[in-house]
Amino acid sequence: SPQSALVGPLEGPTVITDKSQYPTSFSEAPSLADLVKSGALPPVEQRLPKNPMVIKPLQGVGKYGGTWRRAFTGPGDGENGNRICSTDKPLFWDFTGTKVMPCHAEGYDLSADGKTITLSLREGHRWSDGEPFTADDYMFWFNEVFSNKELMPSQTPEMSVNGKQGKMVKVNDYTIQWVFPEPYPLFVDILAGSTALGAGQATRGDELNGSFMPAHYFKKFHPTFIGADEATKIAKEAGYDNWVLHIKFLNTWRLNPDLPVLTPWRTTSPINTPQWVMERNPYYYSVDTAGNQLPYLDKIVMTLAENLEIANLRAIAGEIDLQSRHMDIAKIPVFLENAARGGYHLQLDPGSYGSDATFHFNHSFDGDAEVLKWFKNVDFRRALSLGIEREQLNETFWLGVGTPGAPIPEDASPYFPGAEWRSKWHAHDPKQANALLDKIGLTQKDADGYRLRSDGKGRLRIEVTAVLGSFIDFARICEIVAQQWKVIGIQADVLAQERSLAFNRALANETQIMVWANDGSENLFLFPRHALPVDPAQCFMGINIAKWYASGGKQGTEPTDPAIRKALEIFRSAASKYADERAGMVQEIWKLLVDNVVSIGTVGLSPAVMGVRVIKNSLGNVPARQMNAQHCRTPCTSMPTTFYYTA
C-alpha cells in the first residue's frame, strides 16, 4: 500500500531530567544578542529560569535563523498555531505519547492517597514581557477567573472528582497544589493532556481555561482590581459590550499581540489578518543540550489560503516548509510526483482513533420533536449506520488506506474493546437497515421512496452539517452518504458551513447531525469531547447534555438514553481509579457507544487528519514519524523549537 512505505519509525527528541547533564553556560540567537548589546534586553542568563527545560534534539544541535512558512485558513484555524506552541502547558507527554514529562513545571508529585497533586514551577521563569511567572499567576486564575461566576458561568468538570470540586492552594512562590476531596490519580494525565486545565494558555486561554494567567497584565482590566465601572469603560473603549468579553479577547494569544505568554513564539501579527506571524519569545524557558536558548527558528509565518486547494498547491510548489494540517490525503500521488521539484519529502502519521468522518447525532436537539424522537430511537441510529457503504468511502476519499468501521481506538490500545466491535452495526447491510426502519414504524413512503414523518408533516428530512475547508472533504463524503441513505428511504440534506459558524451552531444546539473526526477519543479521559457529550466548550452530541454533565445536573438537560447515561456514569467514576482499572472501564464505555450507535463511525486509523506531512528537505530534527494524537498536541511532542534549517 502507498501508506506503509511512507510511515517511518516513531522517533523524537528527549527531555533531559538528570540535572547533572544540564548545560552550565548559555547562548542565544544573534538577533537577541544584538538587543542585549544595545541594552534593550537583559543577558540570556537572566532571561532563562534557574533550571530551564533541557532538550536533546532528535538528530543534533541546530543552527539559529530562518522563517517557517505555513498555510492557514482564517481566524477559525487557531489550532494551526496553538499546537506548535503548546509547550506553555504545565506537563506534557514524551514523543511516544505514553509518558508524562515536565513542561513549564519543573516537576510534579501525586500524594500517596491520590488526593493532592503538587506542581513545582521553575524559579526565575519569566513571561514574554520579562515579568516573573510564579504561583501567583496560577492563583490569580483560580481566585479571580475560575471562581468568578461572570467569567466562568459553567466550570470545567475536570476540577471535580466524582462530582466533588477541588481547589488550588499556593505553597510558596514556585509551588502550587491541587487538592481534591477524593483520590484523583487521573489528574496528572489531565495536566499533561489537551484538556481545559492542562492545555495551556495558547490553546484554552480564549475560553479562560488553562489554569494560569499573567496576573500583572490582567489586574489592569479586572473589576476586582479597578472596579466594575472602570472595567466596563475600558472594555467599551476597546469595542466590547462588557468587561467579560474584553478579558476573553485579551487572553486570546492569537488575537492579542500585547498578551504576555510562555510560548516559544509569540503572535506579532494576529490571526484575523492575511498573515498570522509569530516571532521568537526572548524569555522562552528551554535550551538544547549545548545551552542554546530555543527556539532555533526566528519566526513562523502563516499565509492565508482562501481554500484547502490553494494550501495544497502551495505545498506541492515547495512554498511550505513543514505542514500536515490541511494536507489532503487524496493528493498523496501528486505530492510524490512533485517532491523532487518542490524540494520536499512526504511522511505519513496515521491516527490511532477509529473514524476521521464521524456522524455525531445531537442527542439534545430541540428544533424538531419528530427528528429528536427518531434520534432517540436506537434502531433508527443503527439503521443509518447499516445504510453506509464504508468501502466505497475508503476507496474514494482515503485512497483505500483507511480502516472502515466503528469509531473505536486502534487494536493496540489498552482501551480497545475487542475485534468484533469494529464491525458491530458498522457493516453495510441496507436490507437489515430497511427492516429496522419498518419495524420502528417508518413504513409510509412518498412517491420518490422517501420515508414520511409520523406526525403527518410530509417527508422525514435529516440535516447533516459538514464543515468546509477541513481535513478531508466532509461535504462530498456527506453527499455520498446521503445517496447511500436514499436506498433505505432516508432523505439527508447536507449543509456545508465554515468551521466557526458550524461549531457555533452546535453550541447553540442547532445542528442535527454534525460530521467531524473523533480524534482525541483514543485517549478518552484526555479529550472526550468527540466521543461523549461532556464538554460545554465544544459538543456535537448534545450541548445541553454536556452542560448537564459539567454542572453536576444544575444546568442543561438530563440524558434519557440509557446507554448515554450509563457511559457518563462510568466516565465520571473512572477519574478516581488508577490506570489499570480505568482501561477496563473505557472498554465498557466503547461497547455501549458502539452497540447503541451513539455516533456513527465511517473510516479511520488513517493519516487523513493531520497525518500527511510535507517536509522541506533542508529542515533538520524532524522525525520520520510522530504521534498523531490530540493529547500530544501534534506536532508539539516533536518539539518544533528544535527544528532548524540545515542549509
Image: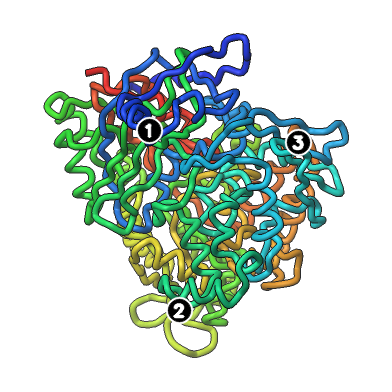
Name the residue rendered at 50%, 27% in the picture. Answer: 286
Above-or-below relation of 83 to 285: below
Secondary structure under the numbered disc 3 in the rendered image: strand
To which quarter of the image does residue 576 belong? top right
Neighbor class of circle 1 (other Cα within 10 Å; few <14, some 14-19, many 20+) is few
Residue identified by numbered label 2: 460
To which quarter of the image does residue 153 belong? bottom right
Q: Toward the viewer: 645 or 113?
A: 645
Q: Is 578 placed left or right of 138 in the picture?
A: right
Mark 1 or mark 3, which has the lower sequence index?
A: 1
Q: Amino acid at mark 3?
A: Thr
Neighbor class of circle 2 (other Cα within 10 Å; few <14, some 14-19, many 20+) is many
Name the residue rendered at 37%, 33% in the picture. Answer: 39
Q: Is residue 549 visible to the viewer in this orientation of the structure?
A: no
Residue 118 is marked as: 3
Q: CA distance from mark 1 to mark 3?
A: 38 Å
Mark 2 or mark 3, which has the lower sequence index?
A: 3
- The C terminus - image quarter: top left
Secondary structure under the numbered disc 2 in the rendered image: loop
Name the residue rendered at 61%, 18% in the picture. Answer: 17
The answer to the question of whether label 2 and label 3 lie on touching residues, with beta carbons closer than 8 A, is no
- The N terminus - image quarter: top left
Q: Amino acid at mark 2?
A: Leu
Residue 39 is marked as: 1
Task: Single out the mark in the foreground, 2 or 3.
Answer: 3
Q: Toward the viewer: 391 or 602?
A: 602
Above-or-below relation of 440 to 36: below
Q: In the image, residue 524 lies at what x, y percent?
A: 62, 44
Q: Amino acid at mark 1?
A: Gly
